[in-house]
Amino acid sequence: MNKARRCPCGRGEAFEDCCGPVLSGERPAPTAEALMRSRYTAFAVGDVDYLLRSWHPRTCPAALTLDPAQRWLFLEITRTDRGGLFDDTGTVEFVAHYRDAGGRGALHETSRFARSGGAWVYLDGTHDD
Ligand SMILES: [Zn+2]
């Protein structure tokens, strides 16, 4: 077997053992934080389908275009509130570091997550910077 690729979300696991099965739909994200990590990974690998699938139907955009010049460098989860196995809502605050045509930048967001049909989905977020 080839040397496993580290998952972009930064948990230190191989992609195949971390966000990979979540992106492919094989395994649902058990917590809001896991869903947040999987969405960061989807941004990093350009998986637009997964980003739309993991978006709450109420707030999901009709289409999503990623900036091909934007490279996601690493993710820092700074705070989580609820979003556990027995919760229906959760909040995750994070800083996502990237590089794009304008240089290096960081997206600081507080995201809200909810369950839809039992699975965690992204509801919306506020940018604090
Ligand atoms: Zn991961």
Image (cartoon, helix red, strand yellow):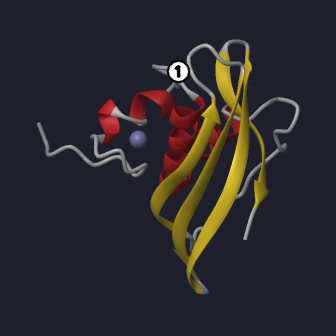
Residue 117: image location, x then y, percent:
73, 13
Q: Is residue 125 above or below residue 14?
A: below
Quick one: 64 or 94, which is closer to the camera? Answer: 94
Q: Secondary structure at mark 1?
A: loop
Residue under the image location 64 percent in, 66 percent down: 107
Q: 119 or 3: nearer the eye? A: 119
On the rendered image, what quadrant is the C terminus found in?
bottom right
Tell whether 61 sits left or right of 3: right
Give whichever of 42, 76 is nearer the camera. Answer: 76
User: Residue 76 vs residue 60: left or right?
Assistant: left
Looking at the image, is 94 positioned above or below residue 19? below
| Residue neighbourhood size for the residue with mark 1, other residues' Cα within 10 Å, grouped as few (<14), some (14–19), many (≥20) | some
Q: Which residue corresponds to the image point at 58% horizontal and 41% vertical from the top-left? A: 36
The answer, for residue 28, to whether it is visible in the render is yes
Q: Find disc 1 in the rendering and name its residue.
A: 28
Q: Judge whether residue 66 can be spotted in this image.
A: no
Q: Position of residue 80 (x, y in %)?
A: 59, 40
* Number of numbered discs: 1
